[in-house]
């Protein structure tokens, strides 16, 4: 600290100095609390977004599992094969159309969620398969022979079922990849937030330490040391040594007020001592 800086601090009154110290401590505390609040809010935001995303993924997986059941081989293809061959245990077209309607409703619910271009393409394929199954059921009713219907199953429905299975696999893979990307994003965001919290927290703690150290040094230099010097001067005066100088009498602050008061008492005591010496000398002259 150079002389000019010391002169500036030396002109600050103790009361003002204390207020500055309190302000610095409060500002640093607010910084620490604000940093903590923002970091905690960011973590909560990440957790809330992750919870919402997991809910969305769970909902999509539920719909996907339903689609796999409604459009599966046992739910659609086998019943259609038995119906086409007019087997004795053939399921009526009502059961098949019911499964197709349920699958179509799930596709519509899936589309209402946030989907990627890949998911949209797969859903379009599934909707096309449902439309084809319905057309084939209507067409089979007009076929004259069982062989013709069976041939249509082998040539059309089985090929379409392969495309349906591929589309369902595409949806499953898309959900898996989205989940992996989201997990990676949340992990990176959490690490980044933790790093920011640690960095800002460490910086705030360092700043608080610097402020405390700075004001501790200034407090010692501005208050403790002057009061110590004034105390020594007062003890010297109390011992009867009035020639001692009283420091800080020229300062326009609380220390200056104390120093000037001590100086006044010193001057009064010195004048009284001189008067006593004068009267003793006069008394000795009169007694001779």
Image (spheres, rainbow, N blue to C red):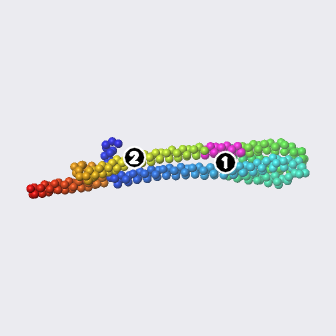
Left or right, 16 with respect to 266, comes to right
Q: Residue at x 72, y 51 (%)?
A: 62
Between residues 237 and 229, which one lies in front from this camera angle? 237
Q: Is residue 35 something one can see in this rendering? A: yes
Q: Is residue 143 something one can see in this rendering? A: no
Q: Main secondary structure of the magenta part?
A: helix
Between residues 46 and 76, which one lies in front from this camera angle? 46
Q: Nearer the viewer, mark 2 or mark 1?
A: 2
Q: Which residue is drawn at 36% across and 48% down?
A: 220
Count of numbered tags: 2
Query: Over which residues does the magenta segment extend?
Result: 171-186
Quarter of the image where one finds residue 171: top right
On-image quarter of the C terminus: bottom left
> Is 246 a magenta residue?
no
Residue 97 position, x and y percent, is: 80, 53
Q: Which residue is drawn at 28% across and 54% down?
A: 258
For disc 1, the marked residue is 115
Label 2: how many Cα within 10 Å (few below 14, some 14–19, many 20+): few
Left or right, 155 with respect to 110, comes to right
Q: Is mark 2 on a helix, strand or loop?
A: helix
Residue 240 position, x and y percent, is: 23, 52
* Placement of 265 over or under 198, stated as above or below: below
For disc 2, the marked residue is 214
Label 1: how many Cα within 10 Å (few below 14, some 14–19, many 20+): some
Point out the tag, 2 or 1, that comes first from the N-terminus: 1
Q: Which residue is drawn at 86% across and 43% down?
A: 151
Left or right, 200 with respect to 110, comes to left
> Is 173 a magenta residue?
yes
Between residues 67 and 124, which one lies in front from this camera angle? 67
């Amino acid at each position: 600290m150079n002389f000019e800086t010391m002169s500036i601090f030396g002109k600050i009154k103790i009361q003002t100095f204390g207020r500055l110290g309190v302000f610095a401590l409060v500002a640093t505390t607010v910084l620490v609390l604000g940093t903590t609040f923002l970091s905690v809010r960011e973590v909560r935001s990440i957790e809330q977004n992750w919870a919402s995303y997991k809910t969305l993924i769970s909902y999509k997986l539920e719909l996907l599992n339903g689609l796999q059941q409604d459009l599966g081989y046992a739910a659609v293809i086998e019943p259609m094969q038995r119906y086409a061959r007019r087997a004795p245990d053939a399921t009526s077209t009502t059961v098949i159309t019911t499964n197709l309607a349920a699958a179509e409703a799930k596709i519509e619910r899936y589309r209402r969620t946030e989907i990627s271009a890949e998911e949209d393409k797969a859903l379009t394929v599934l909707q096309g398969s449902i439309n084809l199954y319905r057309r084939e059921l209507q067409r089979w009713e007009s076929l004259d022979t069982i062989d013709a219907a069976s041939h249509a199953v082998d040539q059309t429905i089985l090929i379409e079922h392969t495309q349906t299975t591929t589309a369902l696999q595409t949806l499953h893979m898309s959900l898996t990849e989205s989940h992996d990307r989201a997990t990676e994003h949340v992990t990176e965001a959490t690490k980044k937030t933790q790093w920011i919290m640690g960095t800002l927290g460490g910086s705030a703690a360092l700043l608080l330490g610097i402020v405390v150290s700075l004001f501790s040094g200034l407090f010692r230099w501005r208050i403790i040391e002057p009061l110590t010097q004034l105390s020594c001067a007062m003890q010297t005066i109390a011992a009867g040594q009035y020639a001692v100088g009283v420091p800080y009498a020229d300062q326009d602050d609380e220390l200056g007020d104390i120093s000037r008061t001590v100086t006044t008492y010193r001057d009064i005591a010195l004048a009284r001592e001189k008067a006593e010496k004068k009267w003793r000398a006069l008394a000795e002259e009169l007694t001779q």
